[in-house]
């Protein structure tokens, strides 16, 4: 269980995240919904030590999370909005290099892990291609595979559909749902209302650094009027 | 056609071994200076893109001094200054070090621009995956920076080969110096300098060709 308590983040005098508190269970998808600049991506970046916090506490399964050393513990994996794959490496090397250099696996073991993940994400036939040569959807699957190879407990996906063709939304949603089914804590930052409709998740609507409404996706669709702000946001983006 | 007649082919053939001897020294200067320039230039580029303001300032000063003064003066400085501080090394090595240090300043700026062209996303991805700073530089930043700067680095190496002729002015028996020696024996300046020019051209063209081939090979990765 990931617990975030009273998290605050400011850039100079501008408040980006204001007293954020929430809990995400294992196998749960927490979807942070909101327009650009409301702080949802910053929250994911904080969890990956790409931004520092001003105050707040984070814990995983009851143990405090030290954000300063979180990258070396491989607790959190990140799928970036633009994937940030290593374009000068092959698809296989994108997975094996971190395994060899960071987890100190030997090349054969790293290849075994890579082949299994590439098979799972339908990229086996692309293993010798360069990351640059993949399509948008393939790049995202490789980015997920690369993150999973490090065996994190939490997976963050920043705007997972924004760099893809809209027809791929179903496919992306299936991949995200599968991550939750596999037992990962999944955090998604998005403004794509199509994506949230396809996920079984907890929705956190954000505005100016605050969580202004929370809803379970099933409850939302059974009774949208109970969540007027989320309903309004969805209506405004259709 | 008349201009071609003033080139004495027999003289070139006769003195070719002497010129080739000089050419080997030229290649030696160029190759070792190039290694010094590449290693030191990469290091300077990394320092210049680091967060340490003092190091960035010192690199900038170094680059300003080296780029702002003629290489010939730098070679002379090394040649006359080093013995003054008790360092006695052969003229060949004085030239190699001076040219290498000069080249490092230019190469540092080429590689710095390559590093700057790499998106912050690459560095963030490496950080999130848990790469150390050294591994991020070695496996992620430098391969991409060198790839994007390959054409400029190729030009720098070609320039370096031509600049190596300045070593002749401190007595190093490289190609130009050997040519001067042949000229003083034969008094046929046009033939000798023609032969030297052709030899330089062969070497620089070969380097340009190889760099272009390497560039094309690397660009294949970007094609579908």
Image (cartoon, rainbow, N blue to C red):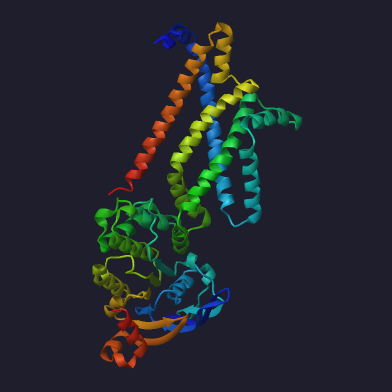
Left-right relation of B84 to B31: right
- Residue B172 in the image: x percent, y percent? 61, 21
Above or below, A79 against A206 in this view is: above
In the image as oriented, which residue stretches furthest toward the front?
B2
Above or below, B168 against A197 in this view is: above
Residue appearing at x 43%, y 46% in the figure? B148
Mark yes or no: residue B209 visible. yes
| Labels in figure, total | 0
Residue appearing at x 53%, y 39% in the figure? B38
Image quadrant occupied by the N terminus of chain B? top left
Mark yes or no: residue A181 visible. no
Left-right relation of B214 to A121: right
Q: Quadrant of residue B217?
A: top left
Name the residue nearer the viewer: A13 or A148. Answer: A13
- Residue A39 in the image: x percent, y percent? 46, 76
Q: Quadrant of residue B63?
A: top right
Residue appearing at x 39%, y 70% in the figure? A158
Name the residue nearer the viewer: B134 or B162. Answer: B162
Left-right relation of A195 to B143: left
- Residue A109 in the image: x percent, y percent? 36, 56
Above or below, B24 against B214 in this view is: above
Above or below, A112 against B209 in this view is: below
- Residue A173 in the image: x percent, y percent? 28, 73
């Amino acid at each position: 269980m990931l617990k975030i308590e009273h998290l605050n983040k400011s850039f100079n005098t501008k408040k980006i995240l204001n007293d954020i508190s929430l809990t995400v269970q294992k196998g749960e998808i927490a979807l942070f919904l909101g327009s650009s600049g409301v702080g949802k991506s910053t929250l994911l970046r904080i969890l990956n030590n790409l931004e520092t916090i001003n105050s707040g506490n984070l814990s995983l399964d009851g143990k405090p999370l030290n954000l300063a050393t979180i990258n070396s513990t491989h607790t959190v994996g990140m799928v970036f909005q633009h994937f940030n794959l290593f374009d000068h490496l092959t698809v296989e090397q994108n997975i094996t290099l971190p395994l060899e250099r960071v987890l100190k696996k030997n090349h054969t073991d790293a290849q075994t892990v890579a082949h299994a993940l590439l098979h799972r994400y339908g990229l086996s036939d692309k293993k010798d291609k360069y990351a640059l040569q993949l399509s948008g959807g393939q790049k995202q699957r490789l980015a997920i595979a690369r993150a999973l190879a490090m065996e994190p407990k939490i997976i963050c996906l920043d705007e997972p559909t924004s760099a893809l063709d809209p027809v791929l939304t179903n496919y992306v949603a299936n991949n995200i749902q599968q991550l939750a089914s596999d037992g990962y804590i999944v955090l998604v930052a998005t403004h794509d209302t199509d994506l949230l409709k396809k996920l079984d998740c907890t929705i956190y609507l954000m505005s100016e650094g605050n969580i202004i409404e929370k809803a379970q996706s099933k409850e939302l669709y059974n009774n949208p009027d109970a969540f007027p702000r989320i309903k309004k946001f969805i209506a405004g983006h259709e | 056609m008349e201009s071609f007649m003033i080139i004495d082919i027999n003289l070139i053939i006769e003195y070719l071994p002497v010129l080739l001897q000089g050419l080997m020294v030229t290649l030696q200067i160029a190759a070792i200076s190039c290694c010094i320039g590449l290693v030191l230039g990469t290091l300077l580029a990394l320092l210049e893109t680091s967060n340490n303001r003092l190091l960035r300032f010192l690199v900038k000063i170094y680059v300003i001094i080296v780029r702002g003064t003629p290489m010939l003066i730098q070679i002379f400085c090394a040649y006359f200054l080093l013995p003054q501080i008790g360092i006695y090394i052969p003229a060949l090595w004085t030239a190699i070090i001076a040219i290498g240090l000069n080249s490092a300043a230019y190469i540092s700026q080429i590689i710095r621009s390559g590093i700057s062209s790499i998106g912050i996303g690459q560095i963030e991805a490496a950080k999130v995956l848990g790469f150390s700073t050294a591994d991020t530089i070695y496996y992620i930043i430098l391969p991409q920076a060198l790839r994007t700067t390959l054409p400029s680095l190729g030009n720098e190496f070609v320039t370096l080969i031509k600049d190596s002729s300045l070593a002749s002015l401190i007595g190093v028996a490289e190609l130009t110096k050997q040519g001067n020696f042949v000229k003083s024996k034969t008094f046929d300046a046009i033939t000798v300098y023609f032969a030297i020019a052709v030899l330089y051209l062969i070497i620089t063209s070969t380097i340009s060709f190889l760099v272009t081939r390497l560039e094309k090979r690397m660009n294949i990765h970007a094609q579908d």
